Image (spheres, rainbow, N blue to C red):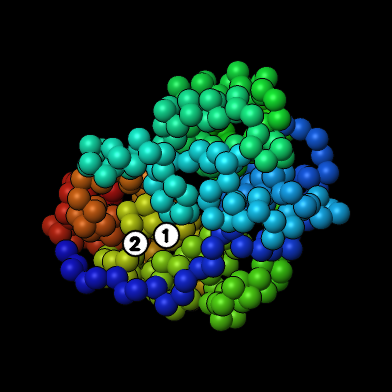
Amino acid sequence: MSTRKPAAPAFVAPPQDGPLPPWLQQQMLDLLQQRGHAWLLQGPSGLGQYAIALGLVRSWLCEQPQADGSACGHCESCHGVEVRTHPDLFVLMPETQLHELDWPLGEKAQKELDDKKRKPSKEIRIESMRDAVEFSQRTSSRNRGKAVLIYPAERMNHVTANALLKTLEEPPGDVRFVLATEAAHQLLPTIRSRCMTHTMAWPQQEQAAVWLEQQGLPAHDAAALLQAAGGRPHDALALASQGVMAASWRQLPQAAWSGQTAAFAGFTPLQAIDALQKICHDAFLVRSGSVPRFFATEDFPTADRLAGWNLLTRWSRQLARDRRSAEHPYNPGLFLEDLLSQARLALQPRRQSAGRAAGSAARPVANYR
């Protein structure tokens, strides 16, 4: 198992509550012109759902909104949102997400975590939802109404989501909701039916690349990471903030082909699986003579050095199964070794991978051959 520590990221992504990119700004302005007490922002990851949701609540609560309805950015209300202390804004997120995006925890939850009674939750807890419902029934402090932001909304389990239903259908007073999700199909139909839905628009590739360069990425890295993220600019920024740049990204298919864990040493299990699923996807395309989506053709071994359809199909199914347990691996190091062992056996033709199965770390390799 590799003991190499991942290097510190050379790039630090700007905060997600900064100025909106042009394509997100236009979508937000369109939403501000429409009436409704609950919005559901849906689409794949990396398209800016959270950024628009925060822009909406900032605009709703702003004391001096501009002519187009957007927030002024300098009033006390805007400052309150920026420093995470606005009394009329309630943010519902998993505790892990709250920490990542610098939102404060409730006093009770913070004490439980400080006392090490439990680990930060990766779901939106029912206790937090009850606090949000109670918040919605209070009187507005600044006479601009109240707002509840829920992200990612798919992290509500059935119990938590059901606790929201009545309030979402008949909101008390002047409260508005915005739910942002990257997996709308996981939400209860009753939640979706109570919201006005906005499907996130994809930016043009050139527009997104220019914006990434404005965030501090060199042009070469911006183009490569945008391709790596499947055209999703916020996911491209997330890759850069992990320390992944064009050169290191393009090494991954060959590293997976040879089962080298060092190239994936800085990845969490979930990030490693995401990268391997993209390699698997593109291996199918290279094998069929098509152009890869997430990598360049030259990043892969030649088609005759790649495994056949059966091995790739089995590997794709195994990665999907592994993804379900990736947030709770029994041992992250061994989990990564096993993932790369699977990758090598799946990508190399039988004649090249025969006899190499003895190094598998966790499961019998017969399952993947």
Question: In the depicted view, which residue is nearer to us: 129 or 108?
Answer: 108
Question: In the depicted view, which residue is nearer to us: 300 or 350?
Answer: 300
Q: For numbered disc 1, what is the local secondary structure?
A: helix
Q: Are marks 2 and 1 in contact (CB under 8 Å)?
A: yes
Residue 332: numbered disc: none
Q: Gap between marks 2 and 1, in whole Å? A: 9 Å
Residue 166 rendering spot, x and y as whole percentages? 60, 18
Which residue in the rendered view is the most extreme toward the right?
Answer: 67
Quadrant assignment, res 153? top right
Please give the name of the residue rendered at 66% of the width and 22% of the height, measured from the top-left corner. 172
Q: For numbered disc 2, what is the local secondary structure?
A: loop
Quadrant assignment, res 32? top right
Please give the name of the residue rendered at 60% of the width and 24% of the height, measured from the top-left corner. 137
Q: Amino acid at mark 1?
A: Ala
Above or below, 283 against 39 in this view is: below
Please give the name of the residue rendered at 66% of the width and 45% of the height, measured from the top-left corner. 57
Residue 16 rendering spot, x and y as whole percentages? 56, 59
**Residue at which label 2 appears:** 267
Give the class, few, some or many, for how many residues have Cα within 10 Å of label 1's Cα (few <14, many ≥20). Answer: many
Q: Mark 2 or mark 1: name the one nearer the start of the chain.
A: 2
Q: Is residue 344 left or right of residue 357?
A: right
Please give the name of the residue rendered at 70% of the width and 25% of the height, measured from the top-left corner. 173
Above or below, 247 against 265 in this view is: below
Q: Is residue 199 left or right of residue 97?
A: right
Q: Is residue 281 left or right of residue 165?
A: left
Q: Amino acid at mark 2?
A: Phe
Q: Is residue 286 visible?
A: no
Which residue in the rendered view is the most extreme toward the left?
Answer: 358
**Residue at which label 1 appears:** 275
Give the class, few, some or many, for how many residues have Cα within 10 Å of label 2's Cα (few <14, many ≥20). Answer: some
Residue 19 rendering spot, x and y as whole percentages? 66, 63
